[in-house]
Image: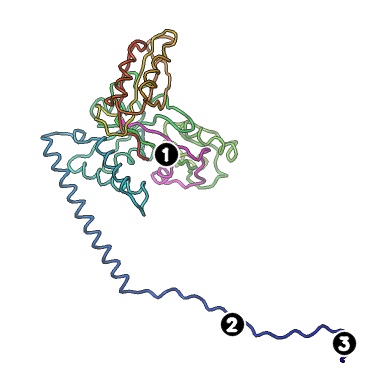
Amino acid sequence: MAKPTGKPPAKKKTAAKPAAKPVKAPAANPQKLQEVRAQIDGIDRQIQELITQRATWASKVRAAKGEMKAAVEYYRPERESQILRRVLDRNQGPLSNEVLLRLFREIMSACLAQQEPLKVGFLGPEGTFSQQALHKHFGHSARSLPLASIEEVFQEIESGNADFGVVPVENSGQGTIQSTLDMFLTSKLKICGEVELRVHQHLLSRTGRLEDIERVYSHPQSLAQCKAWLRANLPHAEKIAVSSNAEAARRARIADDAAAIAGETAGHVYGLKVLAGPIEDRQDNTTRFLVIGREFFSPSGHDRSSLLVFVRDQPGALYSVLSPFAKHGVSMNRIESRPAHSGRWQYVFFIDVSGHVEDDKVAMAMSELGEYASDVVVLGSYPVALL
């Protein structure tokens, strides 16, 4: 028997594993690629032919309605809403609802503008969120008219220089834009639609260096939407409120020590660099815009109505005004009080309800308001925003 040597037993040598061979990508198949491209080319031709047909039939709608002078006389928001809802119902992917809506909106916009585009006023200058909302609702074939104030948007529509207007009315984080509501107290214009726009705020400057910034320009609403970010990142910079985010961008482009809070679009328009963004404090930051015009439109099937209710000064008046809506199963989306401008300490209520004023439930509820409401003004019944 062999004596132990005290040395560990020698390890057996194992054969080295061969190195893994790199996986080769499948070889390109030029013939197959050519077949796919040929299919795409054929589909493109069909799409173009169908768009041409649609534009031709849109022209026939004009002929069927008789001689009309202005594009606004052909525009029907309730009809557009119905078409776009059917687009959503048919969508099975792979494109998202948002992408398909944008594509169809542009096709409809181009067809409507064949002879004369709609003229739409918005709170300017170029590059504001109001202009983005305009394009989302009317498409890029509409002629956008940048105006200096919300009041001027109303005035241009009332005078006939604009067919419609787009004005902000409320933000999901900062609440109502009071200047818009106050215009309805004296204006005879009607609400014809609404747009909900997801708002992303960016810090823009000429130099692109955060350490250069000594003052920040923006609309008061945008400054409020970004106050936590500003407090954490630019605590000593002066915050200056201006009439619009685009105006802020215009000012920031002429000074190395200034920045603007605005959308990326404004940065492109005014040649500014993005320092940071999105910088809004709330991830769900959304602004609702109203489309205003000169007339009422028919029901679309998915509508909202906005009312202006002057309440009599007596106990339980507001409760009694609201009760008929609950009684007839009409949902209330919003209620806001404002000074009535008709006397000291007198107030008027802005109320949004689900449905069109021609719907039976809404009509019955409104017929019961008279005893407690001194006056009821229908500001408009219009299609609910799609996305």
- In magenta, the rendered stretch is 263-291
Between 227 and 67, the one nearer to me in the picture: 67
Determine the CA span between mark 2 and mark 3: 36 Å
The Cα–Cα distance between marks 2 and 1, rounded to whole angstroms, is: 65 Å
Disc 2, disc 1: CB below 8 Å? no
At 40% from the left edge and 38% from the top edge, which residue is drawn? 197
Q: Amino acid at mark 2?
A: Pro
| Nearer the camera: disc 2 or disc 1 | 2
How far apart are the two marked residues, 1 and 3, measured between alpha carbons? Answer: 90 Å
Query: Dividing the image into 4 quarters, which one contains the N terminus?
Result: bottom right
In the picture of the structure, the residue carrying the numbered disc 2 is: 18
The crowding category of the residue bearing disc 1, from other C-alpha atoms within 10 Å (few below 14, some 14 to 19, many at least 20), is many
Q: Which mark is residue 379?
A: none
Q: Quadrant of residue 74?
A: top left
Residue extending farthest bottom: 1
Which residue does the numbered mark 1 point to in the structure image? 250
Task: Assess whether mark 3 and mark 1 are in contact (beta carbons under 8 angstroms).
Answer: no
Q: Which residue is pictured at 19% across the width and 33% down the height?
A: 73
Q: Relative to residue 293, is residue 239 drawn left or right?
A: right
- Mark 2 residue element: loop
What residue would you read off at disc 3?
Answer: 5
Q: Secondary structure at mark 3?
A: loop
- Give x and y (percent) for residue 196: 39, 37
268 magenta-colored? yes
What secondary structure is found at the residue carrying circle 1? helix
- How far across and down, in percent of the image, does residue 337 sit? 43, 19
Q: Amino acid at mark 1?
A: Arg
* Residue 300 to residue 54: above or below: above
Question: Which amino acid, by three-letter code, is at mark 3?
Answer: Thr
In reply to whether residue 384 is colored magenta, the answer given is: no
Q: Earlier in the sequence, mark 1 or mark 3?
A: 3
